[in-house]
Amino acid sequence: MSSLDFEEAGHKLLKIRLEQGQGMELCVMVLECCTEEKTYRSFYGHLAHWFCLKSRVYRECFENLFVQKYSMLQDPTMEETFESIFPKDHRKNTLFSIKFFTKIGLGGITQTLRQLIAKRKETDSEDELRDEMVMKRRRKRG
């Protein structure tokens, strides 16, 4: 977008004069632009916030969009897609993910991982002890 700041971009987008019911398309576009960036750019977050403050319609559209995207995180058919950010392969990786999302205020999306940790706690402890013993044996040999 060729605007200097998010407010200018917002005003330009409002000039498009969307028909009634097309507000969701604008919200989807803002979100998709944000996801296309390699790193988070606050420009799109501020733009979305600006639209939410401008109109109840946009606020409701963004709320609905958030619910859709959040439910996708919980969808079992999407589990493999999110394996890299919600790892279940090793306790250490799982805990890192939980701590990361909790630190940025999104701890709620790690509920499934927290349940997994609780179930695997005993098993992982046994695995870690075995791994430590193997490492000690290797050190003694080498």
Image (spheres, rainbow, N blue to C red):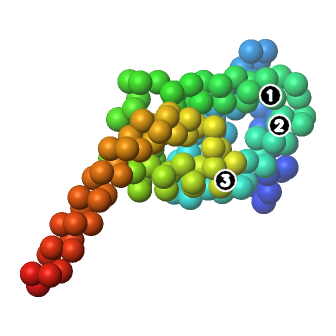
Residue at the bottom extreme of this rendering? 142
Q: Which label sits on residue 117?
A: none
Q: Position of residue 51 (x, y in %)?
A: 82, 37
Q: Is residue 102 visible?
A: yes
Q: Nearer the viewer, residue 2 or 45?
A: 45
Q: Does dot 2 land on a helix, a strand or a loop?
A: helix
Which one is in front in this view, the residue at disc 3 or the one at disc 2?
Answer: 3
Q: How many marks?
A: 3
Which one is in front in this view, the residue at disc 3 or the one at disc 1?
Answer: 3
Q: Position of residue 19 (x, y in %)?
A: 77, 17
Q: Earlier in the sequence, mark 3 or mark 1?
A: 1
Q: Does dot 3 land on a helix, a strand or a loop?
A: loop
Q: Nearer the viewer, residue 44 or 136?
A: 136
Residue at the location (51% across, 27% down)?
74
Which amino acid does the dot numbered 1 rest on?
Tyr
Q: Which residue is mark 2?
A: 51
Q: Which label sits on residue 104?
A: 3
Residue at the location (80% across, 57% down)?
5
Distance of label 3 from label 1 (alpha carbons)? 25 Å
Question: Which quadrant of the view contains residue 86?
Answer: top left
Q: Is residue 15 visible?
A: no
Determine whether, in the image, residue 73 is placed left or right of residue 55.
Answer: left
Determine whether label 2 and label 1 are within 8 Å by CB: yes
Q: Which label sits on residue 58?
A: 1
Q: Position of residue 45 (x, y in %)?
A: 73, 48
Mark 1 Cα within 10 Å, few/some/many (few <14, many 20+)? many
Which amino acid does the dot numbered 2 rest on?
Phe
Which amino acid does the dot numbered 3 rest on?
Ile
